[in-house]
Image: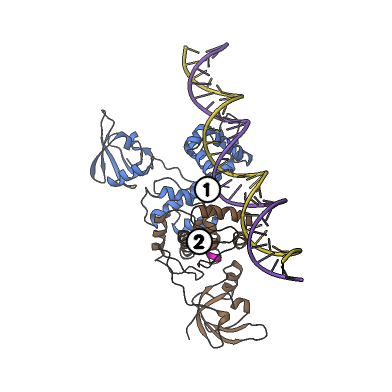
Chain colours: A blue, B brown, C yellow, D purple
Amino acid sequence: MTHSEENYLKAIFHIGKGGANEISTNAIAEQMETKPSSVTDMMKKLSEKNLVNYKKYKGVSLTAIGKSMALSIIRKHRLWEVFLVEKLDFSWDEVHDVAEQLEHIESEKLIDKLDKLLDYPKYDPHGDPIPDKNGNFKVMDKKLLSELSVNDKGICVGVKDSSSQFLKFLDKNKIALGDIIEVIDKEDFDGSFQLKINANSFNVSSQIASNLYVQITE
Amino acid sequence: MTHSEENYLKAIFHIGKGGANEISTNAIAEQMETKPSSVTDMMKKLSEKNLVNYKKYKGVSLTAIGKSMALSIIRKHRLWEVFLVEKLDFSWDEVHDVAEQLEHIESEKLIDKLDKLLDYPKYDPHGDPIPDKNGNFKVMDKKLLSELSVNDKGICVGVKDSSSQFLKFLDKNKIALGDIIEVIDKEDFDGSFQLKINANSFNVSSQIASNLYVQITE
DNA sequence: ATTTAAATTTAGACAAACCTAAAACTTTAT
DNA sequence: ATAAAGTTTTAGGTTTGTCTAAATTTAAAT
C-alpha cells in the first residue's frame, strides 16, 4: 500500500461516513484536492486490488478489505493525535498535519505499543472515536449543540469542524471537551445561542452551535 | 526534500563518516541497495540543489547544507530510536526499520518536543551520538574491544555492527551498554578474548570483539 | 604505452501518481 | 424526448525514481 492509496481509502471512508454508499468521483477529487481524472486512475488500481467496488460512471464503495484498511489508517491517525497532545503537549489544532504523516508508518507493533502507552484511548483530541485493532468503535450518542432546545443540558464531547480556526476560537473562549453546557436561550432572529458553560455565560452564533457536539445529560 | 533524497544524503554522510571525503558512485549504490546509474541520476539532482559537490567521474561530497540536512535526518532517526526503546519497550534490535520510516516525518516542533520528552538524550540505543538541533555532537572517546590489551578495563558504550543478529547475540549473552568489561586474556591462536563482564567470565570471538566499542577506564 | 578491467555515465524504458484536453456517458430541464 | 449541463472517463503527457544495456572515462596491469 502506497501513501496515496491509503489516502484515497481514507477519503472514501470519510465521505461515505463509514457506510457502504456509492461515492462519486468528483466527491473524492474534492476531498483529495486532486482532479477527477486522477481519481478514476486510482479507482481502477484500487479496484484491481479488491479494495473498492468500482463500475464505470457508477461511483465506488469500499470492499470489506478496503474498509478495514481505512479503519486501520484512521486508528493510527487518531492514536498519533492523542500522543501528540498527551505526550508532546501539542494543542488540538496542531496535530492534524503531523498525524497525517505519522498515520502511514508501517509497524503493527508500533501501534500496539503506542495504544498501550496512551492507555488505550477511546477518543481522539477532537472527540472522534478511535477504532480498536479489529476496527470496532463505539459511536457516541451525541447531538449538535444547534439541535438542543432551551434548558437542555449536556457535556461537550466533540467538534464537527476540526479546522485550526474553529479550534483556536474554542480555546480563546475557554470551551473544551468535557465542559458542561446549558442552553439558556435561543435567539430566533439570528439563530444564536445563549449558553452557560462551566458557570460562565456565553453567546455563540448558530455556526458555532452547529459544529459542537454535546451529549445530553438532562 | 523527498524521502529518497534524504536517504541519499544520509548514505553519503555515513559512507564518508561525516567527513568531506569524495564518495564513489558505487559505494553509494551499494549502501542504498540500488544501481550506480540511479545514483548518478540522483547526484545530478542533489548537485542541482546544492546539496552535494559533484564532478562527473570524480565522486561526490556533501556541501555544508547537505551535511546539515543529513545530520538533521540522523538526529531524527536516533531520537526516534530512543523513543521506541524508552517509551514503547522496543528492544534495540527492533528499532532500526521503524526509525527509518519515522526519520522522514517533517515537523520541527515534533522533534523538539520528542527531544524534550526523552530528556535530551546524547546517545541512541546503540551508543551512537545524537546531533543537537545545530548538528553538533560529541564524539565519544571509544575503542573497539579488539584493540584492547590484557588487563585493560572499560565500559561497553556502543556497537559497530548494529545488525539484529549481533544485537540479539549480545542480549542472549547478557552483554549490554554500560557493562564493565575487563580483558583477562587474548588467545593468539584464533584472536578470541577471555573477558570478565560484570563479574562473569566470558569468551568471545575476535569478530565479536571487533564490533563492540568500549571506553577505557584504566 | 597500450591493453584490459573496473567504474561511471548516458540513453532509453518503465511504473506511479499526477495533469490537461477531449470524448463519452448521465442527469436535468424544458 | 431531446438539448443542455454536469459528471466521468479516455488519451496522451509530465515528473520522480528506478531499471537495463551500451558507451565512455578512469585505473590497473603488463
Residue at 54% in and 65% down: B14
Q: Are marks 2 and 1 in contact (CB under 8 Å)?
A: no
At x 29%, y 42%, the residue is A181
Residue placed under numbered mark 2 in the picture: B62
The percent position of residue B47, horizontal first and vertical second, equals 52, 55
In the image, A135 versus A49, the foreground residue is A49
Residue A135 seen in this snapshot = no
Q: Quadrant of the C terminus of chain A?
A: top left
Mark closer to the observer (2, 1): 2
The magenta stretch is B13-18
Q: CA distance from mark 2 to mark 1?
A: 40 Å
Please say whether residue A139 is visible from this viewpoint.
yes
Report the residue marked by disc 1. A72
Q: Position of residue B143 (x, y in %)?
A: 52, 78
**Left or right of residue B180, residue A202 in this image:** left
Three-letter code for the amino acid on which mark 1 is drawn? Ser
* Label 2 and label 1 in one chain: no
Q: Mark 2 Cα within 10 Å, few/some/many (few <14, many 20+)?
A: many
